[in-house]
Image: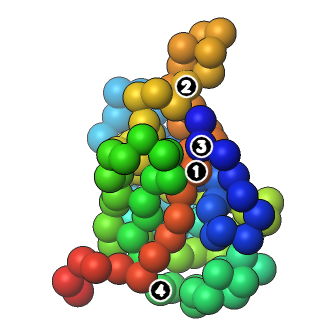
Amino acid sequence: MAQRREGDGVQRLTTVRSNDQFNTTIYGYKDRLRGVEGTRMVVFMNEEDIGRLGFRSGEIVDIETVAGDNIRREVQGFRIVPHAIARGCAAAYFPEASPLVPLSHFEPKSCTPAYKAVPVRLKRTSAQA
């Protein structure tokens, strides 16, 4: 797993499901638990982190993995949504954020992919609006 350095802008990303999402369902576009409607392309962040990292609520960003294995993993076009989440952490929907999880990033005892602690950095989007 990548080592986190203080002050480098690395967030710990967890993947989450919307309130109506189950293993075998079509993914919905209304998450009543988090107040998101019409899209799943969002990244939830602590409000202090949003400002500290120089972003604004509602800004569109790309998310890239910080894994140290020289493989580029990036998802594009995620809207920042303030949420009650711990500082230094972020959350995005599964499976939209799944491309960020390195195969080598797993829990050693169970060999389960580490979808709950992916080291990522946000950057201003390169996607065309």
Q: Secondary structure at mark 3?
A: loop
Q: Earlier in the sequence, mark 1 or mark 3?
A: 3
User: Mark 1 to mark 3: distance in Å?
Assistant: 7 Å
Q: Earlier in the sequence, mark 3 or mark 4?
A: 3
The quarter holding residue 123 reads bottom left
Q: Earlier in the sequence, mark 2 or mark 3?
A: 3
Residue lying furthest top: 109
Residue position for label 4: 59
The total of numbered circles placed on residues is 4
Q: Say if mark 4 contacts mark 2, CB within 8 Å.
A: no
Residue type at numbered disc 1: Pro
Q: Say if mark 1 contacts mark 3, CB within 8 Å.
A: yes
Q: Earlier in the sequence, mark 4 or mark 1?
A: 4
Residue position for label 2: 106
Residue position for label 1: 119
The spot of residue 21 in percent (x, y) is: 45, 41
Circle 3 or circle 4, nearest the eye: 3
Which of the pair 66/44 is nearer the observer?
Answer: 66
Residue type at numbered disc 3: Ala
Please report the residue visible at 47 percent of the width from the left and 86 percent of the height from the top. Answer: 59
Q: Is residue 46 left or right of residue 20?
A: right
- The crowding category of the residue bearing disc 3, from other C-alpha atoms within 10 Å (few below 14, some 14 to 19, many at least 20), is few
Q: Secondary structure at mark 1?
A: strand
Residue type at numbered disc 4: Glu
Circle 2 or circle 3, nearest the eye: 3
Q: Earlier in the sequence, mark 4 or mark 2?
A: 4
Q: Which mark is residue 2?
A: 3
The quarter holding residue 127 reads bottom left
User: Mark 2 to mark 1: distance in Å?
Assistant: 12 Å
Q: Is residue 95 left or right of residue 59?
A: left
Please report the residue visible at 65 percent of the width from the left and 9 percent of the height from the top. Answer: 109
